[in-house]
Image (cartoon, helix red, strand yellow):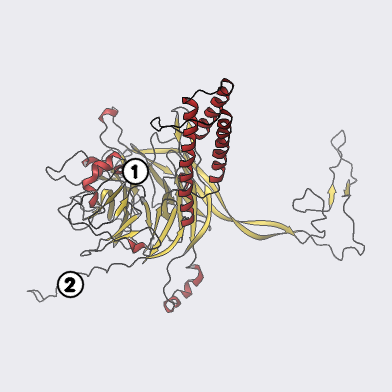
Amino acid sequence: MNGDGGEVSAAPASPPPLEWKFSQVFGERTAGEEVQEEYWTEVDHMSDSLHHFLCKGAEVFFLLPPCQSLIKQRMDKAKAATMLSFDDSIPTNPPPHPTEFLHLLGALFVFKTSLTDKRKSVVFVSTVDIISAIEFDKSGDHLATGDRGGRVVLFERTDAKEHGGSRRDLERMDYPSRHPEFRYKTEFQSHEPEFDYLKSLEIEEKINKIRWCQTANGALFLLSTNDKTIKYWKVQEKKVKKISEMNVDPSKAAGNGGIASSSAMVIPKPLLANGGSIDRAYSYLSNDFSFPPEGFPSLRLPMVVSQETSLMARCRRVYAHAHDYHINSISNNSDGETFISADDLRINLWNLEISNQSFNIVDVKPANMEDLTEVITSAEFHPTHCNMLAYSSSKGSIRLIDLRQSALCDTHTKLFEEQEAPGSRSFFTEIIASISDIKFGKDGRYILSRDYMTLKNLSKKFVTNISRPVSQLWDINMDSGPVATFRVHEYLRPKLCDLYENDSIFDKFECCLSGDGLRIATGSYSNLFRVFGCAPGSTEATTLEASKNPMRRQVPTPSRPSRSSLGGADCQIVNANGNSFDFTTKLLHLAWHPTENSIACAAANSLYMYYA
């Protein structure tokens, strides 16, 4: 009770932390494949050593003149085939007899060739198989992934279909809750490698972003982009139609082995000189056709029936030649008709039905490129207001613009930028301040941003004493600072110099929000990802590993920096809790189900799914 006799409403309690469980994995390698890869690596080392000995022996010692030219040819052929480099510091022994030497070189060349052929039969994580984009559709019933090979793979949810229509939704209360289950639906080649002859530039086929569009007539629509070209795809089930109920056995019917159409072959009527034709029909039966002795009991006309369905992906539009720099973002508008594409210096507005024209709405390119101080890193449309969008920069700022103000939005409506603490600036300040990804909340009020070290949440209250790198949550109604800041891997701060040397500091991690806006998630190294609670008073901070046992690695934030070694061949760091982290395995891409607590994340070529 307060002084006026009114009741004081109690602060809402924060939701309890979620208990995450493994759901599914697609594309995971087995332990046997990993052992095979290590085995072939050892075989490579052995063959390289043998090759080194033989080639160095031929170069050091003088052999018989008739054999020198043959040995030189074999040695050059072996070098060209294996592309090996040799260390002159390794001592050599006297070679065998020249004839034996030739046999050894020939055997080595055959061995290396057979080794290459055998390696093709072993499954490895190829670069083209690494997943580079993940996206749920608005309903959460479909999931799309893109990889570095330019392929788009679609998955569909199966557990929701098993319970039937809407009338049974209430009856589902009687059944135990089931975790979401997805299955492979289809895949198609979205992009191919290209070459820009004017700029002498190779264009990779890697899928940078995927965005779902509105469905229509049971067909799925989505946008996919690589560095230069955006494509609009339609995926729909097509019924395969066949002709049935023929009078004649199709195996005996005339034709070229295709679909049986008729047992009679009709010759075109010969034309007269004046353009007329003879009225008498010219037709005859095929030579291999014969009437049955008892005749046909009845005449059945051919019928076209649909026996099976197959998924077909068709490219509806290609939006090309509009970006001079690499495309880093695409985003659908809430009007369902337009979308934006952003590169380092420009943001273009497209209409889905017009592929040969776009409008430049943001241009940060200076007249003199030497005056360039920041670039665009990510862009996102507002989920409900079709006239608003936000984009982030490499300086750590987020700009909110209104398309109603002007055709070219050189000025922003609001600027979200965190002020640096005095005396905290260093060589790495601008690098780790660069925002790699931004996401709007479902209601459009909050913006989640991810820089190298943190997540930041813009909301109603401003959390002070913020230090990078973290994720931040911003409130578009308050541009004074982020509502909340979440430190993702603070233990890396003492090792920024080593991270800079091996280029890990430039990794671009994505972030995502739950459908109810109570939690956020982002990735880290060693295939780890973290889930934070962003509700008022929440202390939830869960570390999960992209494996079948997600709770195996718990990484509490260390109280003080620990001595660690980074760099070298292993690229690992050990924190105060004794956990080692591998910087060659990183979880960059993940997505949250729009209506349920389910996360899909990519670890190399594997797609892991978890639920709570």
Q: Position of residue 368 (x, y in %)?
A: 28, 27
Left or right side of 62 for 518: left
Q: Is residue 454 above or below residue 17?
A: above
24 vs 183, nearest the viewer:
24
Name the residue tied to disc 1. Answer: 569
251 vs 404, nearest the viewer:
251
Number of numbered discs overlaid on the protein picture: 2
Q: Residue furthest left?
A: 3
- Kindly report the distance in space between the C-alpha atoms of the residues bearing marks 1 and 2: 55 Å
301 vs 520, nearest the viewer:
520
Which amino acid is tagged 1? Ala
The reply to whether the C-beta atoms of the residues labelled 1 and 2 are less than 8 Å apart is no
Name the residue tied to disc 2. Answer: 10
Q: Secondary structure at mark 1?
A: loop
- Where is the N terminus found, in terms of image quarters? bottom left
Quadrant in which residue 67 is drawn: top right
Q: Residue at x 91, y 45 (%)?
A: 280
Q: Position of residue 569 (x, y in %)?
A: 34, 43
Crowding around mark 1 (Cα neighbors within 10 Å: few <14, some 14 to 19, many 20+) is: few
- Where is the C terminus found, in terms of image quarters? bottom left
